[in-house]
């Protein structure tokens, strides 16, 4: 018996055909996997967990989709979309961003259009939140959040944020410098398209020894300990803290409040464009919307999501409050973001 | 022999040289809020960083915090390093590992520990209040003091181990000879031990100074939002406003100043360390 290996012509052809088919087979498997895989750029923490629970697992998984969360901060996510916009394929299928970030991404033509054909649930979106390049996922407003034990009467005016009797007791989140400056501008004769007068408000805050807190959690801890009595933060956050036993309330002042909308978009060069739109549609599903309200205190953006009346009373805005919300000039914010941070750092933190 | 250097050299070139070259190029571009940046060749970012009082102050703060931290670290490290170097018992290896122990804990975790220690409701203030020594908390957290304490805590093991390695190489007989000739312990230290250990001081101080200049987590977590140092300022430009050209310019200014300062240090101490 010999062990000589003899390669016949038939075996050679079979091997050749097999080798030729392997990449094609692998590619088709890869494409199939990609068609069922949606990469979602998102925040981590409560936001990412609620998204996973209410959208990824509850809606996308039964439809046969695998959702991969890519967790990062919003600016790197926006930067990634802008930097990748010239590439044939981007790395995200869906990006969750604040409204001014999706605006910036859409301004350079990086986002795919959201139509009712692609996202049927967008038909239910509240008219004032409707955009052609993104869906509004959740919204609230950055309001005055105060310690109810120290300030029994809800602050009625934004001028209360500069009331000398609260010297040393006003705390501001470093992270929300844009919102803080919007309040400072509005209190000093500015507008949503002119934050110039904010400088005066920042100087007044400095004179009142207003504290800058590094994170949202630090603001919560300072409110709890009594180190600060008042801040500017999302009403939704005020609701979350009150659920955790911190005695806080929120108030939309007579002058108004700065709305905060978190949106989701699909980059034009997404690998799985169709999957991305299926995901946006799932985000607008009433069950996903109410899950975010219960967990995070943000309001639904669709008319067909009905909140529990008790919850509605705690987190909802009345018609009059809704009317008082300011309309941010997203173009102004985008063009002046670097300048706003510079002013915040120099005139207030410096 | 040169072939042995090739893999590591290529890796450094690829992973360090290439991104730095890219950043250097970006630093000459102009910022564009819409498209991130526009290709250009301008010194405007460098000019702004150098002439703007706000950024000059940040650089100045970074410099004095780093110099002070390096000085304190050197002072604190010399004793333990000498003790470790001259130790002959079996405890030596165990103590060397113990010296390294703080490095096993990440910077963020360590800073969280300092927050629990130095905060208004922290352990030190609670103890002082418990003893009736103070009625209001002493503000320690979010001050330059907290940053220097935190940085010294991070870099101390590097200095101890570097100094110990050099002191170990100094013959004990040199100290004994000086003592036999009537030198007092302080004279032995200043005339014999310190001059001979200067190469170690130089190496340790250089390493520590570089780490201090580039400190990020400690200034952010212990200095608070109102305390500014260069590394967080660079990070802010990249991640909060996407101003890559200015962030890159700040990063290169930090790099050049660090190289300049370490070179000056080497010249000053190196000259004294050279044998007569």
Image (cartoon, coloured by chain):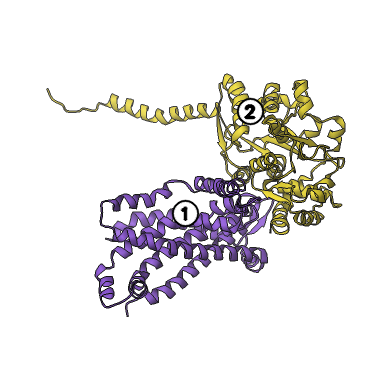
Chain colours: A yellow, B purple
Residue for point 29% across, 51% down: B91
The subunit carrying tag 1 is: B
Residue drawn at point x = 64 percent, y = 63 percent: B55
SS state under label 2 = helix
Q: Which quadrant would the C terminus of chain B be assigned to in this image?
A: bottom left
Q: Is residue B246 visible?
A: yes
* Residue B154, numbered circle: 1
**Distance in Å between CA atoms under marks 2 and 1:** 45 Å
Query: In terms of image quadrants, where is residue A280?
Result: top right
Residue A157 at x, y percent in the picture:
85, 43
- Image location of residue A72, percent across then percent down: 58, 41
In the figure, is residue B253 to the left or right of A10? right
- Mark 2 residue crowding within 10 angstroms, few (<14) / some (14–19) / many (20+): many
Q: Is residue A142 visible?
A: no
Residue A299 image position (x, y, % from top left): 74, 29
Q: Residue B127's x, y, as percent? A: 56, 47
| Relative to A169, A4 lies left or right | left
The furthest residue to the top: A62
Report the front residue among B272 and A23. B272
Question: Is B11 placed above or below B178 here?
Answer: above
Q: Nearer the viewer, mark 2 or mark 1?
A: 1
Q: Residues within 10 Å of mark 1 (few under 14, many from 20)?
A: many
- For label 2, the residue is A279
């Amino acid at each position: 018996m010999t062990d000589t290996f003899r390669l016949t012509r038939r075996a050679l052809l079979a091997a050749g055909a097999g080798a030729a088919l392997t990449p094609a087979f692998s590619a088709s498997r890869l494409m199939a996997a990609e068609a069922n895989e949606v990469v979602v750029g998102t925040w981590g923490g409560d936001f990412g967990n609620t998204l996973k629970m209410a959208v990824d697992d509850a809606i996308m998984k039964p439809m046969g989709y695998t959702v991969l969360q890519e967790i990062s901060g919003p600016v790197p996510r926006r930067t990634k979309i802008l930097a990748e916009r010239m590439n044939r394929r981007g790395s995200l299928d869906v990006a969750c961003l604040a409204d001014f970030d999706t605006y910036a991404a859409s301004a350079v033509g990086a986002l795919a259009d959201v139509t009712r054909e692609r996202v049927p649930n967008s038909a239910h979106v509240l008219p004032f939140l409707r955009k052609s390049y993104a869906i509004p996922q959740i919204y609230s407003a950055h309001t005055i959040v105060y310690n109810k034990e120290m300030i029994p009467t809800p602050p009625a005016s934004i001028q209360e944020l500069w009331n000398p009797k609260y010297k040393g007791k006003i705390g501001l989140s470093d992270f929300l410098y844009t919102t803080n400056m919007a309040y400072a501008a509005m209190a000093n004769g500015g507008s949503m398209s002119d934050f110039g007068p904010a400088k005066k408000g920042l100087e007044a805050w400095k004179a009142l020894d207003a504290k800058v807190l590094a994170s949202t959690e630090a603001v919560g801890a300072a409110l709890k300990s009594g180190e600060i009595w008042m801040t500017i933060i999302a009403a939704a956050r005020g609701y979350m803290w009150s659920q955790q036993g911190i005695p806080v309330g929120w108030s939309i002042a007579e002058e108004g409040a700065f709305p905060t909308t978190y949106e989701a978009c699909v980059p034009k060069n997404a690998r799985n464009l169709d999957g991305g739109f299926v995901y946006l549609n799932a985000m607008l599903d009433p069950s996903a919307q109410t899950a975010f309200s219960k967990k995070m205190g943000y309001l639904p953006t669709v008319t067909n999501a009905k909140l529990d009346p008790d919850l509605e009373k705690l987190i909802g805005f009345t018609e009059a409050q809704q009317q008082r919300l300011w309309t941010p000039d997203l173009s102004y914010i985008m063009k002046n973001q670097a300048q706003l941070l510079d002013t915040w750092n120099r005139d207030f933190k410096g | 022999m040169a072939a042995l250097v090739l893999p590591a050299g290529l890796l450094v070139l690829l992973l360090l040289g290439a991104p730095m070259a890219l950043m250097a190029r970006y630093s000459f571009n102009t910022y564009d809020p819409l498209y991130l940046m526009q290709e250009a060749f301008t010194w405007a970012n460098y000019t702004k960083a150098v002439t703007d009082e706000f950024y000059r102050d940040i650089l100045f703060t970074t410099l004095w915090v780093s110099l002070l931290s390096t000085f304190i670290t050197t002072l604190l490290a010399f004793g333990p390093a000498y003790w470790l170097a001259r130790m002959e018992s079996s405890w030596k290896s165990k103590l060397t590992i113990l010296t390294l122990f703080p490095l096993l804990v990440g910077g963020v975790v360590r800073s969280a520990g300092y927050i629990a220690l130095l905060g208004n409701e922290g352990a030190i203030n609670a103890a002082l209040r418990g003893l009736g020594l103070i009625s209001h908390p002493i503000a320690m957290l979010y001050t330059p003091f907290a940053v220097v304490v935190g940085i010294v805590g991070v870099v101390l093991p590097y200095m101890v181990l570097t100094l110990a390695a050099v002191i170990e190489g100094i013959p004990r007989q040199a100290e004994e000879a000086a003592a036999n000739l009537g030198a007092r312990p302080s004279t032995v230290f200043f005339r014999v031990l310190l001059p001979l250990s200067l190469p170690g001081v130089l190496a340790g101080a250089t390493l520590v100074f570089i780490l201090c200049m580039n400190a990020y987590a400690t200034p952010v977590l212990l200095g608070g939002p109102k305390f500014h140092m260069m590394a967080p300022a660079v990070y802010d430009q990249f991640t909060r406003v996407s101003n890559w050209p200015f962030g890159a310019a700040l990063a290169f200014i930090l790099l050049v100043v660090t190289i300049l300062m370490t070179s000056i240090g080497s010249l000053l101490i190196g000259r004294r360390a050279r044998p007569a």
